[in-house]
Image (cartoon, coloured by chain):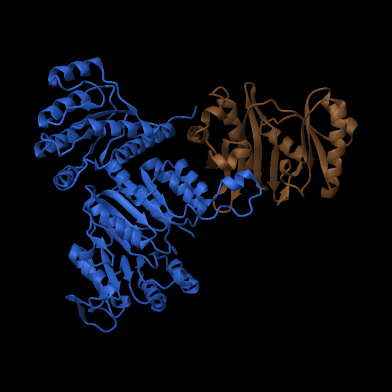
Chain colours: A blue, B brown
């Protein structure tokens, strides 16, 4: 593969044609056009259909060659055997980028058809995503090639997290889950068979994308090994990259001649590349979200020392244990100044120690005073606030207090709230204000540990080596 | 893929600042006795046909009396007949210590990969190792050690950290600069109070 493929026309198009757009609401091409209309795409939109005159109120064209302007993006949703001819027309029309959502290529054994597609794309220099993919979504430019009906899939708000996935099903599941979290989306890219545009191109693009603060990737295979290493190292040095790799248990190296070869199987090698690039390695889909929200919301911690403020003793102890199990975080020891200030501010039943148990009747006021003291304590690098809403004291005013602290705090601060309805409501409230909320001490500790580990990676990379 | 001659592999390592335990080929029992000079030695049969020496009874350890050495030599050369061509190598006996492994292999997709971990016969049971793709920076090497549960064993409580790091960087450089070398095992490397000692070397190459 030659020059770097430019994904900008795909994600920031001014003009889009949808080949296979249809009046039949059951057709993929119809759903995509409908989604573009729903999203309020501000550019020019051209349905392409051989027989229809108008689709969803827009004038339809028989071919991309009939469209008078040079198109940035063409979304192709026609049966696989018809795709090469459409690509050929796109080439002649000078189209810059294509998203081929159609399936029926290498994934079902039609490698020749896929090779044909790539050769046309390369010949005309069309950056081509897919085939067999969901395509792209960018809420800022209101691009949305996803052919999933809107009522089935909640779509996230605008934000700084970009998500790339080979698998369309994992992609749409995560997208749906993201919409339930407090953080927002920058780009969603489902790249399917990766026939031409692959993880290397996408990683390169997202690393440089100013709208992307955090990259989240789900990958199954890596196609271009050496180029991937270079792209991974570059991206990891610029911004946090969270990765979930499927296929860990695939058979190791066959017929190993040495102990090294027996140990260092495919997954182990890939994992080592992720580590070398500073990637945050997730073990499960839920980890992707737990890590994404803390990296999107929180500053770099200055050190590993955590203060815990809680309104439940048991939850404080569980969280202390989880921090210990992380192997890298430690419990902060308050300065004397902090301890004295807290002693004065708190009722006698509050024991001044870390975790700081404010007791079950603690409300807005006690949280306020505790956070004020910890915020200025030089021995505290990060803060975990446990707020259990089943207690008599915790309510919306207490949650609002945490949000206010979040806005002015220079230290990473996260919340643990465990519970159903009333808790869920407050979790939503805090998360939509950019305050990450976790419902288990283990997840919270893992997220803080990842944040701290990445800060260490950044520090090591910016210093000349010892 | 071919196993590189042991002494050739030993010299190759030396070019990268990696010394290994004193060794020599011996072609008679007398040779072996004079190599020993009264010190404890080990003797091994080396042959392309037998890759797992210790499992096949092709290793004799802790020989120091001339009589012991002579009878071990006779026994090993008998076993060697079935594996011809073969050589017998004599090595100075290593001190007791903690066994670690340093190795490398070539991944078809990503290139040369370097490994360090807890070694010896349990390496595949504990699977405590760290990997990185070459070239290796000093920070990469540091991070590899930090990743090991057995970091304190591997570095001898931190006292041999520098030597182990340079061993690791040496192996990475060797792999990067010798494209024909596809696999390398230094297992075990024995870590003692006095430093590390490479006890067994296996280098596989394309030539």
| Total numbered labels placed on residues in the image | 0
- Where is residue B183 shown, x and y percent of the image? 65, 46
Q: Is residue B176 visible?
A: no
- Where is residue B90 shown, x and y percent of the image? 80, 33
Seen at 50% across and 34% down, the residue is B148
- Residue A434 in the image: above or below residue A39: above
> Is A443 displayed left or right of B34 in the figure?
left
**Rendering quarter of residue A371:** top left
Q: Is residue A462 visible?
A: yes
- Where is residue B78 shown, x and y percent of the image? 86, 43
> Is A263 displayed left or right of A297 in the figure?
right
**Rendering quarter of residue B57:** top right
Task: Give the camera-side residue of B201 and A461.
Answer: B201
| Residue positioned most to the bottom | A51
- Where is residue A121 shown, x and y percent of the image? 43, 68
**Rendering quarter of residue A45:** bottom left
> Is A269 displayed left or right of A454 in the figure?
right
| Residue positioned most to the front | A314
Seen at 89% across and 33% down, the residue is B29
């Amino acid at each position: 593969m030659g020059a770097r493929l430019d994904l900008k026309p795909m994600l920031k198009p001014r003009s889009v044609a949808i080949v296979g757009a249809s009046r039949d609401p059951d057709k993929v091409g119809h759903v995509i056009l409908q989604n573009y209309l729903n999203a309020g795409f501000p550019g020019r939109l051209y349905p392409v259909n051989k027989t229809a005159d108008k689709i969803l109120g827009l004038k339809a064209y028989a071919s991309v060659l009939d469209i008078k302007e040079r198109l940035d993006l063409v979304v192709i949703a026609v049966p696989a055997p018809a795709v090469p001819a459409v690509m050929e027309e796109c080439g002649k029309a000078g189209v810059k980028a294509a998203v081929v959502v159609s399936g029926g290529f290498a994934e079902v054994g039609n490698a020749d058809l896929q090779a044909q597609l790539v050769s046309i794309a390369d010949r005309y220099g069309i950056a081509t995503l897919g085939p067999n993919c969901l395509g792209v979504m960018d809420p800022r430019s209101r691009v949305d090639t996803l052919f999933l009906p809107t009522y089935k899939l909640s779509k996230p708000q605008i934000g700084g997290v970009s998500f790339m996935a080979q698998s369309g099903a994992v992609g749409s599941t995560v997208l749906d889950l993201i919409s339930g979290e407090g953080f927002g989306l920058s780009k969603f890219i489902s790249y399917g068979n990766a026939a031409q545009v692959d993880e290397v191109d996408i990683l390169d693009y997202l690393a440089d994308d100013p709208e992307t603060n955090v990259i989240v990737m789900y990958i199954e295979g890596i196609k271009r090994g050496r180029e991937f290493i270079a792209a991974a190292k570059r991206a990891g040095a610029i911004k946090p990259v969270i990765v979930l790799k499927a296929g860990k248990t695939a058979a190791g190296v066959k017929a190993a001649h040495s102990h090294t070869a027996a140990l260092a199987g495919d997954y182990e090698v890939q994992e080592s590349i992720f580590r070398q690039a500073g990637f945050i390695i997730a073990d499960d889909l839920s980890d992707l979200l737990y890590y994404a929200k803390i990296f999107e919301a929180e500053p770099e911690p200055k050190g590993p020392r955590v203060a815990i403020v809680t309104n439940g003793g048991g939850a404080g102890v569980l969280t202390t244990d989880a921090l210990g199990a992380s192997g890298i975080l430690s419990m902060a020891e308050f300065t004397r100044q902090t301890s004295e200030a807290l002693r004065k501010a708190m009722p006698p039943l509050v024991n001044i120690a870390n975790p700081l148990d404010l007791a079950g009747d603690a409300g807005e006021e006690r949280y306020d005073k505790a956070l004020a003291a910890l915020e200025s304590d030089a021995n505290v690098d990060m803060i975990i606030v446990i707020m259990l809403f089943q207690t008599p004291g915790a309510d919306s005013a207490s949650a609002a207090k945490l949000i206010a602290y979040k806005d002015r705090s220079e230290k990473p601060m996260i919340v643990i709230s465990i519970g159903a309805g009333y808790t869920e409501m407050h979790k939503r409230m805090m998360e939509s204000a950019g305050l990450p909320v976790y419902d288990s001490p283990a997840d919270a500790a893992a997220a803080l540990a990842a944040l701290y580990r990445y800060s260490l990676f950044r520090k090591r990379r910016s210093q000349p080596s010892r | 893929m071919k196993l590189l001659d042991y002494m050739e592999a030993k010299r190759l390592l030396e070019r990268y600042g990696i010394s290994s335990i004193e060794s020599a080929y011996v072609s008679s029992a007398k040779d072996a006795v004079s190599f020993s000079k009264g010190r404890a030695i080990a003797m091994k049969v080396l042959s392309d046909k037998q890759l797992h020496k210790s499992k096949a009874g092709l290793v004799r350890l802790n020989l120091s009396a001339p009589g012991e050495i002579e009878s071990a030599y006779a026994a090993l050369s008998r076993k060697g007949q079935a594996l011809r061509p073969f050589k017998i190598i004599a090595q100075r006996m290593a001190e007791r210590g903690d066994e670690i492994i340093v190795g490398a292999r070539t991944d078809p997709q990503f290139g040369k990969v370097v490994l360090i971990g807890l070694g010896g016969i349990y390496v595949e049971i504990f699977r405590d190792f760290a990997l990185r793709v070459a070239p290796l920076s000093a920070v990469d090497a540091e991070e590899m050690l930090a990743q090991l549960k057995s970091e304190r064993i591997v570095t001898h409580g931190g006292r041999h950290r520098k030597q182990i790091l340079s061993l690791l960087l040496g192996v990475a450089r060797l792999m990067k600069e010798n494209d024909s070398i596809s696999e390398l095992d230094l297992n075990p490397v024995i870590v003692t109070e006095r430093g590390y000692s490479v006890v067994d070397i296996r280098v596989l190459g394309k030539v």
